[in-house]
Amino acid sequence: MAKRTNKYKLTLEEISLAREEDISNAPLTLEFDNHDNIFNIINAVKSKNIFEDENQSTEFAIGLKMLTEVVLKNRDLELFKELQPAIGEFMKKLKSK
């Protein structure tokens, strides 16, 4: 039986660039899956009032969930070996807030 996951589509679009000489990029669309409901995570992080700016709560939640899911899916990669214990401790600390 296939494992059920939540499926998402994220579009990243440049609004403006800090340096005029930088080349503008076309919007990037990414489809991915995650074992957690990311919208529930976003709401949970917002409710903790960690950041003064609510947008930062959303940025943090999305970035953290995308990073941790990739680490989880690739837990055997040497690149992530040192990071895994730190992520575990960080997640415990975050959940206890």
Image: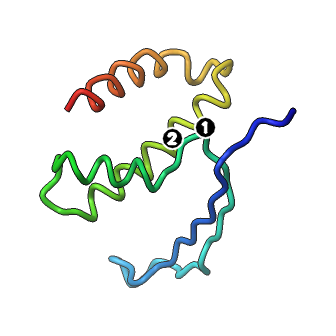
Q: Are marks 1 and 2 in contact (CB under 8 Å)?
A: yes
Left or right, residue 4 beside residue 21: right
Question: For mark 2, what is the residue?
Answer: 67
| Residue drawn at 29 percent across, 47 percent down | 45
> Where residue 23 sits: x, y (%)?
53, 79
Q: Which residue is the extreme one toward the left?
A: 52
| Residue drawn at 68 percent across, 44 percent down | 5
Give the structural element (helix, strand or loop) at label 2: helix
Image vertical order of residue 74 relative to residue 9, above or below: above
How crowded pointer 2 is (Cα within 10 Å; few <14, some 14-19, many 20+) is rated as few
Image vertical order of residue 65 relative to residue 91, above or below: below
| Residue drawn at 32 percent across, 22 percent down | 92
| Residue 48 location, quadrant | top left
Name the residue type under label 1.
Answer: Val
Question: For mark 1, what is the residue?
Answer: 70
Image vertical order of residue 21 relative to residue 93, above or below: below
Left or right, residue 88 beside residue 48: right
| Residue 31 location, quadrant | bottom right
How crowded pointer 1 is (Cα within 10 Å; few <14, some 14-19, many 20+) is rated as few
Q: Which residue is the extreme one toward the front?
A: 1
> Where residue 49 sits: x, y (%)?
16, 50
Image vertical order of residue 74 relative to residue 12, above or below: above
Give the image's coloring scheme. Answer: rainbow
For the N terminus, give its image quadrant: top right
From the viewer's side, name the closer residue of 20 and 26. Answer: 26
> Where residue 38 sits: x, y (%)?
49, 51
| Residue 36 location, quadrant | top right
For the C terminus, give its image quadrant: top left
Q: Which residue is the extreme one toward the right?
A: 1
From the viewer's side, name the closer residue of 85 and 41. Answer: 41
